């Protein structure tokens, strides 16, 4: 069948169309465990086999260069999600909801800039997305003119080891990169994204919310920001276990040697 039945298509899949043409798909999850329930039903699409094998890419990322945050100048890197005027597929959150969320995110950042004269923001748009539909210049115009909000084209993985805080408006590959790099990380998430994730994914999201890394409203986000500034060791300790579980689920760093070893074992197992 060209498309699976709804009962087989349980969750949203990034790169969904590729799954029709491959025999095997390796995820970034912990090779010691089975793929998370976010992949349930995928094997009904075709005879494709889903396996965890970890990520060499994540393992090789440069680590955060700081151990403390100096409060004389604080640099926050905001790497934004796509802000398209259309849906890339019918399971995505609508453009209208994404735009409303972006407004909330920018208003929170405006409050932080107002409350912290020592705060500067680097803003990196999603690759391939320009500012034509982006309200940042309008909402943060005062701070753009002051030079406290600056647009950057530098890859986030080159900036995250150097900045004080990494900030996102959704959990994505950038979040996986940030927690592996070790930079203090915040995510202002919207509930429609939360509703799309699998049952295991919701559990991890709840844990990340409980430790303050993920939040769904401005006031919670400001509290998390203040905790990073005033009790960084406490913030890091609270996030240690949720980060580990997130990585085991979908973003587990492995060395090249480990990756090849795990892959060879899978090939032997599939041929036996």
Image: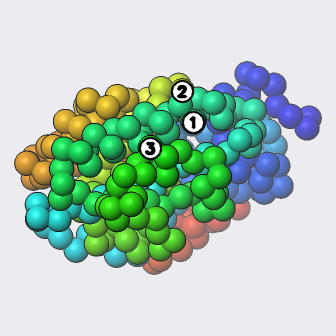
Percent across and percent down for residue 199 are: 49, 27
Q: CA distance from mark 2 to mark 1?
A: 13 Å
Q: Residue at x 45, y 78 (%)?
A: 257
Please state, as top left, top right, bottom left or bottom right, where the C terminus lies in the image. Answer: bottom right
Question: Which residue ends up furthest to the top in the rendered image?
Answer: 7
Mark 3 element type: helix
How far is the residue under mark 3 from the one under mark 2? 23 Å
Q: Quadrant of residue 10?
A: top right
Q: Left or right: 83 with respect to 106?
A: right
Q: Are marks 3 and 2 in contact (CB under 8 Å)?
A: no
Residue found at x 35% / y 55%:
143
Q: Residues within 10 Å of mark 1 (few under 14, many from 20)?
A: some
Question: For residue 218, what is the image quadrant?
Answer: top left
Number of residues whose C-alpha sits closer than 10 Å to that of mark 2, classed few (under 14), some (14–19) or many (20 or more):
few
Q: Which mark is residue 192?
A: 2
Q: Is residue 215 above or below residue 260?
A: above
Q: Which residue is under mark 3?
A: 139
The answer to which of marks 2 and 1 sits earlier in the sequence is: 1
Left or right placement of residue 220 versus residue 168 in this view: left
Depth check, front residue: 182 or 24? 182
**Which mark lies nearer to you, 3 or 2?**
3
Q: Which mark is residue 99?
A: 1
In this rendering, which labeled residue sits more in front, label 3 or label 1?
Answer: 3
- Secondary structure, mark 1, is helix
Q: CA distance from mark 3 to mark 1?
A: 13 Å
**Residue 248: horizontal and vertical position, in percent?**
40, 49
Query: What residue is rendered at 67% in x and 45% in y?
Result: 84
Residue furthest to the right: 1
- Image point (44%, 43%), residue name: 139
Quadrant of the drawing holding the N terminus: top right
């Amino acid at each position: 069948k060209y498309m699976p039945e709804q009962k087989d298509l349980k969750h949203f899949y990034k790169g969904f169309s590729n799954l029709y043409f491959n025999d095997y798909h390796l995820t970034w999850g912990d090779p010691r465990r089975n793929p998370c329930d976010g992949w349930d039903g995928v094997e009904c699409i075709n005879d494709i086999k889903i396996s965890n094998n970890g990520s060499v890419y994540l393992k090789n990322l440069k680590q955060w260069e700081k151990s403390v945050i100096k409060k004389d100048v604080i640099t926050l890197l905001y790497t934004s999600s796509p802000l398209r005027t259309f849906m890339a597929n019918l399971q995505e959150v609508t453009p209208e909801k994404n735009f409303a969320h972006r407004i909330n995110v920018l208003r929170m950042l405006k409050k932080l800039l107002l409350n912290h004269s020592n705060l500067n923001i680097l803003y990196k748009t999603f690759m391939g997305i320009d500012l034509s539909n982006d309200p940042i210049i309008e909402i943060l115009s005062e701070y753009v003119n002051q030079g406290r909000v600056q647009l950057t084209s530098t890859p986030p993985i080159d900036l995250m080891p150097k900045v004080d805080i990494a900030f996102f408006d959704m959990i994505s590959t950038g979040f996986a990169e940030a927690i592996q790099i070790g930079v203090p990380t915040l995510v202002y998430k919207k509930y429609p994204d939360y509703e799309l994730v699998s049952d295991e994914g919701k559990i991890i999201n709840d844990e990340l919310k409980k430790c303050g890394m993920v939040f769904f409203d401005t006031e919670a986000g400001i509290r998390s920001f203040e905790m990073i500034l005033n009790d960084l060791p406490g913030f890091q300790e609270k996030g240690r276990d949720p980060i580990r579980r997130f990585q085991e689920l979908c973003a587990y760093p492995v060395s090249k040697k480990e990756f090849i070893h795990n892959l060879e074992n899978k090939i032997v197992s599939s041929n036996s």
